[in-house]
Image (tube, rainbow, N blue to C red):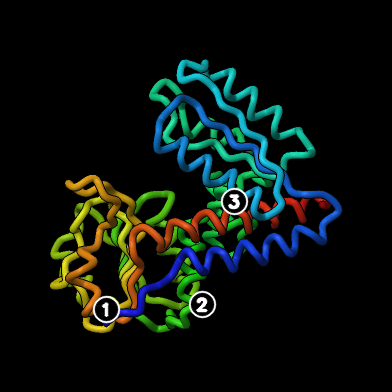
Amino acid sequence: MAVRIDGKALAAQVKARVRSEVGTLSRPPGLAVILVGDDPASAVYVRGKEADCAECGIRSFPHRLPADTPEETLLELVRQLNEDDAVDGILCQLPLPPHLDADLVIHTIRPDKDVDCFHPFNVGQMSIGRPAFLPCTPAGVMEMLRYYQIPTAGKRCVVLGRSNIVGKPMAMLLTQADGTVTLCHSRTPDMEALTREADILVSAVGRPGLVTAEMVKEGAAVIDVAMNRGPDGKLCGDVDFAAVEPKASYITPVPGGVGPMTRAMLMCNLLTAAKKHGA
């Protein structure tokens, strides 16, 4: 039976370390959070990040804009926050309404305030192993692997999903940790043959029940990044948890696994940004 990786408990430890270090700074770090529109899921995520800030002694500057906000209005807000010395990090909650260009907004955020690590400059720095920040979800996964002493060097690692937010950077970080990495996606033939070889299997597709027990190697560490709603309305990941748990050595539950760590690593990035800004 697999060890359940407790992301909630580990995230609490990470945030406690951040809070302790924040207490040594000359001023508290500041996070500006932009929410455009009234998407319920986005609103929940934003409230969670604001709660994390309060827990870590970080100032939160919320900016809630109507769904019909013109693009130039949003960009001008970002430019103002770029120049605000009280703001160390800028987070624009995605997805944005369809008339807004998310890439343009991300590119407008100053790289030293891009605590999501979405800006091309920061992605490039990460790709050559010289990151200012790390993308929060993949960084959270790597922290889990380190804490639970799950080795990556020389191990076969398979990542399902090639998104810019999770899949691609996850593959980069596992490679930099000396894993032998295969990145799978919708065009990958015989994906199950690859997943059955994985010592570490990370799924970030967004399809409930995608990963079955037959796809998992005996004793593999299974990391479920996805957050879906099942037919019963309950939160679930990509992994058939009940079937895979007896076969794996380690497994993340959904919820309570990767999600809390994603938020905790955002706090780490914000602390890093504040230090770079002389706090």
Question: Which residue was labeled with disc 1?
Answer: 248
Q: Determine the residue positioned at 62% across, 61% down.
A: 15
Residue type for callout 2: Tyr
Q: Write down the residue under mark 3.
A: 52
Is residue 230 shown left or right of residue 274? left
Q: Report whether 28 appears left or right of 149.
A: right
Which residue: 42% across, 61% down? 258
In three-dimensional space, the C-alpha distance between marks 2 and 3, rounded to whole angstroms, equals: 21 Å
Category of crowding for the residue at label 2, using alpha-carbon neighbours closer than 10 angstroms: few (below 14), some (14–19), many (at least 20): few
Q: Which mark is in front, 2 or 3? A: 3
Q: Secondary structure at mark 3?
A: helix
Position of residue 12 relative to residue 166, above or below, is below
- State which tag comes first along the sequence, 2 or 3: 3
Mark 1, other Cα within 10 Å: few <14 / some 14–19 / many ≥20: many
Tell me if mark 3 has few (under 14), some (14-19) or many (20+) residues whose alpha carbon lies within 10 angstroms of its own.
many
Q: Which residue: 61% across, 45% down? A: 114
- Callouts 1 and 2 close, C-beta under 8 Å: no
Q: Is residue 95 left or right of residue 63?
A: left
User: Total label count?
Assistant: 3
On screen, residue 219 above or below 100: below
Mark 3 belongs to which amino acid? Asp
Which residue is disc 2 drawn over?
A: 147
Residue 18 in view: yes
What percent of the width, then of the height, locates residue 88?
71, 44
Quick one: label 1 or label 3, which is nearer the N terminus? 3
Marks 1 and 3 in Cβ contact (< 8 Å): no
Can residue 120 be seen at all in this image of the molecule? no
Residue 154 lies in quadrant: bottom left
